[in-house]
Amino acid sequence: MISIQKIKEPDALKVYRLSGGIYDGEHFTEVKDEIRKALLQEQGFICAYCMRRIEKNNMKVEHWLCQSDNDGLTLIYSNLLGCCKGYDGDKRSKLKTCDTKKGNKKLKYNPSNNLSRINQIIKYNGDGRISSTDEEFSEQLDSVLSLNYFRLIQNRKELFSVIRRKLSEKPGTRTNEEKRRILERFMTRDKNGKLFEYCGVVNYYLNKLINK
C-alpha cells in the first residue's frame, strides 16, 4: 500500500451524478469505463491495497466506505479506488484479499486521503510482511484485507532481495545520492504511466536507509 494522489474526477461521472444516475444503473457502463481509466491513471496501474498490477479489464472499482451503508457516496470519486480481484476465481487460492476480502467491512485509513499519511504509517519488513505503526490498522491489514497472504509476502520479499542486490552491485557503502537514484528508478512511471508492482516496498526501504 502506498499513498495515492487523487486526480480530477471524470467529467462523465460528474454529469451522470448530477443527472440523478445511480451506481450500476442505466447508462452507467460507459461512465464506469471512464472511472476505471481515471483510477488506473492516478494509481499507476497497481492495486490500491496490495500493489499488484491491475488493468482496465482485470480490476474492481472499490468503495472505501461501502455502498450498503453509504448510499450517498456511491458516485463520489474521492470514495473510489481501483483494486485487483483479490484472487477471486483462482482455484489455487482459498484465501481472498483486498476488496474481495474486505466486502462491507471498514478500514481506519484510506490510501487516497492525504490525512491518512499512508507512507508514514505503513511498514514493510524484510521477511515480506506488511504492518502499520497504528496497532488497529495493522490488525485490519490482516483481518480485513489479508495483505499478509503468503503469495503477497513472497512477492514483497523478492523485491526486497532485488533492492539489496542493487545496493551491493559495487563494493562499499552506497551514498544517499546513489540510493535516491535507485529509488527514483523504481518510483518513476513507465511510458504507459505504470508504476513498478509493489513499489511501496522500495519507497519504504530506501527512504528508511536514506533517513538513518
Image (spheres, grey):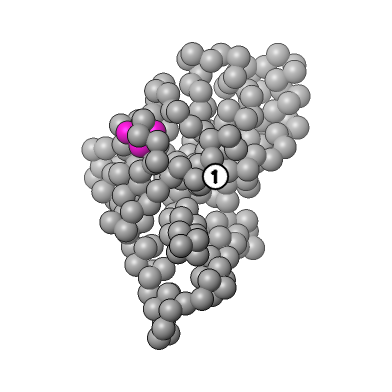
* Left or right of 152 on screen, residue 199: right
Q: Decide if residue 49 is in sight here.
A: yes
Estimate the x, y position of residue 117 in percent, counting from the top left. Answer: 54, 40
Which residues fall within the magenta stretch?
137-141
For the point 50% across and 42% down, which residue is it?
A: 118
Estimate the x, y position of residue 18 in percent, counting from the top left. Answer: 75, 18
Estimate the x, y position of residue 159 in percent, counting from the top left. Answer: 38, 62
Compared with 171, 4 (above or below) is above
Q: Decide if residue 56 is in sight here.
A: no
Q: Amino acid at mark 1?
A: Ser
* Left or right of 111 on screen, residue 191: right
For the point 39% across and 78% down, which residue is it?
A: 168
Q: Read off the residue under disc 1.
A: 3
For the point 31% across and 49% down, which residue is it?
A: 129
In the image, 87 versus 172, the foreground residue is: 172
Q: Is residue 140 magenta?
A: yes
Compared with 99, 197 (above or below) is below
In the image, 209 versus 102, the foreground residue is: 209
Mark 1 Cα within 10 Å, few/some/many (few <14, many 20+)? Answer: many
Q: Main secondary structure of the magenta part?
A: helix
Estimate the x, y position of residue 134 in percent, counting from the top left. Answer: 40, 36
Q: Which quadrant would residue 88 be assigned to in this image?
A: top left
In the image, 177 versus 140, the foreground residue is: 177
Q: Which quadrant would residue 73 be assigned to in this image?
A: top right
Compared with 43, 136 (above or below) is above
For the point 36% across and 30% down, which residue is it?
A: 136
Residue sitting farthest toward the bottom: 171
